[in-house]
Amino acid sequence: MKSIITFLVLAITTTSLFAQEESTKKKFTVEGSVDTYFRQNLSGPNGEDAIAPNTSFANRNGFAIGMANVIGSFESENGKVGAVADLVFGPRGEEAVFLSGPSSNIVNQLYVYWNVSEKVKLTLGNFNTFLGYEVISPTLNFNYSTSYMFSYGPFSHTGIKADFTLSEDWSAMVGVLNQTDATEFNFDNDYTLGAQLGYKTTYLNFLYGKQGGSTESTFQVDLTTGHDLSDDFYLGLNATYNDTDGASFYGVALYPQYKTSESFTLGLRGEYFAEAEGGAGAIGGYDDEGDASVLAVTLTGSYTVGDLTIKPEFRLDSASEDTFLDTDLEPNSSLSSFLIAGIYKF
């Protein structure tokens, strides 16, 4: 009798475990990436005096690491509800979550969602921004270094948003959010409004609310679009304008990309970025009125070998003021640099 009972217990337990495993496979997925790079200035100092454009990520000297990104997605079998936990480790991740406290400084995204219907989706929690052309993950950007517009726009929001499918071509989103990049909680009791109107691959984005303890609300409008002009040629565009009580920045960038083979694509980012009355403090040098501008041209090659992508990149930043240093550590208005990055996606 004991042997029979033992057999039945083992059979039931094993069946339950197999059932749970099968159910888990349907509900849970893991994906992510690892990136690393080598960077060197061509017209500026390296080593202990190394400088870099005042943009996010990819700005360290010599051999450097980016981040490890692990994304766990949970979803009910009917796809009605789910959750995402997006974790980051390494310097790129630390820069991405710079306003997070010690308890959540590896959390890039953490949210739950509910597909209320085929046309309405609610999301609650911390999610990456809907503004801009570029994103935090290096697997989703063509260029490895990032633009000024991305670096001084929002990275992430915590709040609630509702996405609407209006038709086959049109979409919309509205959200109530904490201060930009304040991912853990609302520490000043000010709220930001976010909105988006989309037509196919073109999106017009809006953000309005107090940021970083500012006395006046920030207003930002942002346009992103991208189109396949042929089987081999793609063109993307990003334009943005941000104002806080007269201190403003604005910019526009083009992203042409040409596919030369199944494994290699060549792409360019040409960005013009300007600040007025100090702007966001992005460029680092200003005239008597607090104005400055920079033209940044980035040429990137993308070569894929299975799940690994190798990206050699040449970048030239030319500013209206002497915001950089030359090899003799003298002020200079331009800086040229080179990097090569390796990105593995799993």
Image (cartoon, rainbow, N blue to C red):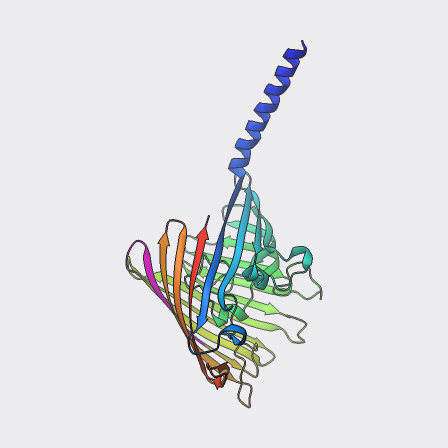
Question: Residue 53 in the image: x percent, y percent?
Answer: 49, 74
Quadrant into which the N terminus falls: top right
Q: Is residue 280 magenta?
A: no
Report the front residue among 342 and 120.
342
Left or right of residue 35, residue 191 in this image: right
Residue 15 sits in which quadrant? top right
Q: Residue furthest front?
A: 47
Where is residue 197 shown, x and y percent of the image? 48, 62
x, y (%) of residue 135? 49, 61
With respect to residue 204, does 51 lie above or below?
below
Q: Give above or below for 224 relative to 83.
A: below
Residue that protrudes farthest toward the right in the picture: 188
Quadrant of the image occupied by residue 272: bottom left
* Rendered view: 161 above or below 245: above
Q: Position of residue 222 (x, y in %)?
A: 49, 69
Looking at the image, which residue is at 64% across and 60% down? 183
Can residue 77 be spotted in the picture?
A: no
- The front one of 153 and 151 is 151
- Magenta residues, start to end: 261-272
Residue at image position (39%, 61%) is 311
Asked if the stretch drawn in magenta spans residue 268, the answer is yes
Q: Which SS type dominates the magenta stretch?
A: strand
Whether residue 274 sits left or right of residue 227 in the image: it is right
At horizontal 33% and vertical 60% (from top left) the residue drawn is 265
Q: Residue at x 64, y 65 (%)?
A: 179
